[in-house]
Amino acid sequence: MMIDNLPYRQVGVEDARAGGILCVADHASNYVPDDIQLGIDPKLLNAHIAVDIGVGGMADRLARKHGLPAHIATVSRLVCDLHRKENEAAVVPSESDGHLIPGNIGADLAMRLERFHRPYHTALGKLIDRLQPRLILALHSFTPSLETSDETRPWEVGLLYNQDDRAARHAIRLFGEQGLTVGDNEPYSGKQLNATMDRHAEARGIPYCTVEIRQDQVNTAAGQSRWATLLADIMGRVALEV
């Protein structure tokens, strides 16, 4: 749920030290404000098209237990996809993974951007300017396969990046050393989908890892706790190497 009508919440930022690791979770919520009607089966709000399952819990744990301050979305990507550029059609999606979102057809795009997208990114930018993080962790989760594709993604964790692969390459090696199946994310890479990190990390020259974790690994509190601990350890090691 949105707090104080803000499309984000920040955890562990007040006493965060500069030059550390910042966690960003663009797709951490399935919340839809009461005055927005998507026109979909409510069951879909618990599916991947509405929320990255497990991400909110992991981001909270990273902030509260591991000292990684977090900027966390509080609105569903079906309302406004905060991990898209303002001029992309999918910023207010009328379709997602084969599902029509009829309430978004003809939606007031300017209102959605002003109410959700711009405050989210303005606040994130200010937080980055204040904390000057050494590394940004962008946290997502993924389904083993898309509903519109028979192709399965074989790994437990995937990395995305655009031009700057400094941190991702270290992370892939370190995840592999933990015995995890890891690699470059498919069927899309950070060269196709990297809006938040393009804007807030690559544009500032800040190393980053966009990490996608398979949903069945993080759909329980135990799984989220395990992965938060693993992420804190590996991202700490990455931050020392970039």
Image (spheres, rainbow, N blue to C red):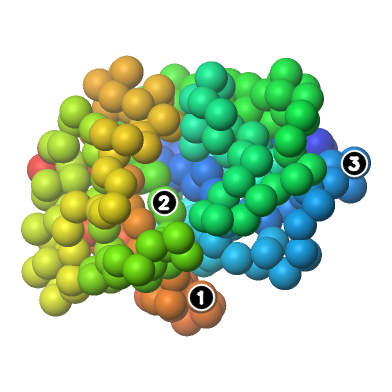
- Distance in Å between CA atoms under marks 1 and 3: 29 Å
Residue 3 showing in the rendered view:
no
Residue at 69 percent across and 31 percent down: it is 116
Three-letter residue code for mark 2: Leu
Secondary structure, mark 3, is: loop
Three-letter residue code for mark 1: Asn
For the residues bearing labels 3 and 2, Cβ distance under 8 angstroms:
no
The residue closer to the viewer here, 28 or 184, is 184
For the residues bearing labels 1 and 2, Cβ distance under 8 angstroms:
no
For the residues bearing labels 1 and 3, Cβ distance under 8 angstroms:
no
- Residue 105: percent from left, percent from top: 74, 35
Residue holding disc 2: 139
- Residue 35: percent from left, percent from top: 90, 41
Secondary structure, mark 2, is: strand
Dot 3 or dot 2: first in sequence order is 3
Q: Quadrant of residue 193?
A: top left
Badge 2 density bin: few <14, some 14–19, many ≥20, Cα 10 Å: many
Q: Which mark is residue 219?
A: 1
- Distance in Å between CA atoms under marks 3 and 2: 28 Å
